[in-house]
Amino acid sequence: MAQTLPPYATAPPRRAVRRRRLPPWPRGPKPRRRTELGLLLFVSLITLALYVIAEFGEKSRIPPHLGPFLGVILGISLVSHVANRWFVPDANPVLLPIAALLNGVGYVVIVAWTPAEAKAQAAWVVIGVVLYVGTIAFVRHSRDLDRYRYLLLLVAGALLIAPLVPGIGRTTLGARVFVHIGSHDFQPAEIAKILLCVFFASYFAEKKELLAIPSARLGDHLVIDPRPLVPIILVWIMAMGVIGLEDDLGFAMLIFAMFIVLLWIATGRWGYLAASVLLFAAGAFFAAHFFTQVHGRIETWLHPALNSQLGESTLSLAHGGVGGAGLGLDRFTGDIFGITTDVVFTAVGEGLGLIGASAVIMAFVLFVGTGLRIAQTARSDFSRLLATGLTVIIGFQAFIVMAGVIRILPFTAGIALPFVAYGGSSLIANYILVGMLMRISQEGSTGTSLPGDVDFLVAA
């Protein structure tokens, strides 16, 4: 007779074990986090020293609230460091300190030029760090973003269209790029650029073989099937069309550059790059002759004396010299329009001179190099393309702004120097961007990946 088991032996447990919502605190030494903590403390001291210099130059006395200021800086640094120690313990130790350094320099420049904006900028920094912590805490795997690419595309489209909606859209200097909500102005394109980057990276990761390998027959030859490229080009054209209606030339250039770089990285075909250069040249020629705003920017570039903002910026940079005129000291000009927003690099160059401006440029170069290194160590096609696109956003945006100020390229208003310029939209978006890069770095450092991810062997 077969032996039967008692009912409790086969019955399922009454209560299922709850999944841990947050990861456990990682134990053991974390050399990368120690390095990061040291760099963050060093950056805090640099920010404090520049702040004291700016206040002393303006008021000839040491600021009385130096202790609380240092406490806030150290508090923000420790919060971000503890969050990294908890959620991304093996991520890159350099990326966040570079962002903190640029943010600190920008805040001191705002204190020196427009003290009334300093309080609001400090609040935006705190909000940005909070959202940074939220990003690395709730985005547990970069591939999670891949699942919602079409939803993110719809959100990006809504954000791009928002400034055109009557009643909430606001026009500034001929560009309709801000949304007015309550007593605050918000620039939706700052968030939309990240969402579009996620969509482009996801689509190219899925279709890279169809876009790179000839599979369609044309006579006796195999050519690349153009059909997979049609949807992504339509999305790009729609984004460019909306941005064109808003006269937001800076973000149009930024999204174009991101699109082309991701297409080239995904396929490795130089033909796409050459075609994009020709397309850009044709578009620039057409825009320069038929769009008043573009024509005006080129005229200002060729004749800066016609524009008081750009002309005064050039003279202010010359006044800064090699070592700088000093933070809070005599300035060559009075109030330059957009000195802490569009042309904040001018304030850096005049106050800190060629040395300070070069330090800011090198910080951006290090940021781009670190981001590309993170992309090299990524564990999937999507993560690799996403890290590359996010890095291109910061690098190209910084290049457009700084090149426009020093007249290497036509000056483009409405686009902010990342982490340095005054403004909540840009600061919040960039801290979220850094959080996404840190998540990708963590996955590449620990080798964690979801099923279906492709491991890459990167030659050193």
Image (cartoon, rainbow, N blue to C red):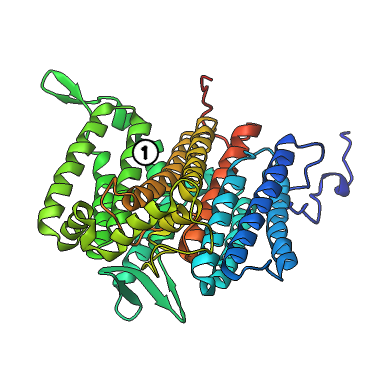
At a point 32% along the width and 44% down the height, the residue shown is: 257
Residue that carries the numbered disc 1 in the rendered image = 262
| Disc 1 crowd, CA 10 A, few/some/many (<14, 14-19, 20+) | many
Q: Is residue 270 above or below residue 395?
A: above
Q: Is residue 179 above or below residue 411?
A: below
Q: Quadrant of residue 217?
A: top left
Tally the numbered discs. Answer: 1
Q: Is residue 286 above or below residue 130?
A: above
- Give the image location of residue 422, x and y in percent: 48, 64
Q: Nearer the viewer, residue 213 or 42?
A: 42
Residue 104 as seen in the image, left or right of residue 365: right
At a point 63% along the width and 33% down the height, the residue shown is: 445
Q: Nearer the viewer, residue 348 or 437?
A: 348
Q: Quadrant of residue 94?
A: top right
Q: Nearer the viewer, residue 187 or 223?
A: 187
Residue 365 as seen in the image, left or right of residue 245: right
Which quadrant of the rendered structure holds the N terminus? top right
Residue 116 seen in the current view: yes
Q: For the residue labelled by badge 1, is the local secondary structure a helix, a strand or a loop?
A: helix
At a point 58% along the width and 62% down the height, the residue shown is: 54
Give the residue type at disc 1: Leu
Residue 141 seen in the current view: no
- Give the image location of residue 111, x and y in percent: 55, 66
Q: Nearer the viewer, residue 74 or 250?
A: 74
- Give the image location of residue 367, x and y in percent: 51, 41
Residue 304 as seen in the image, left or right of residue 392: left
Q: Is residue 242 above or below residue 401?
A: below
- Give the image location of residue 353, x and y in percent: 47, 49
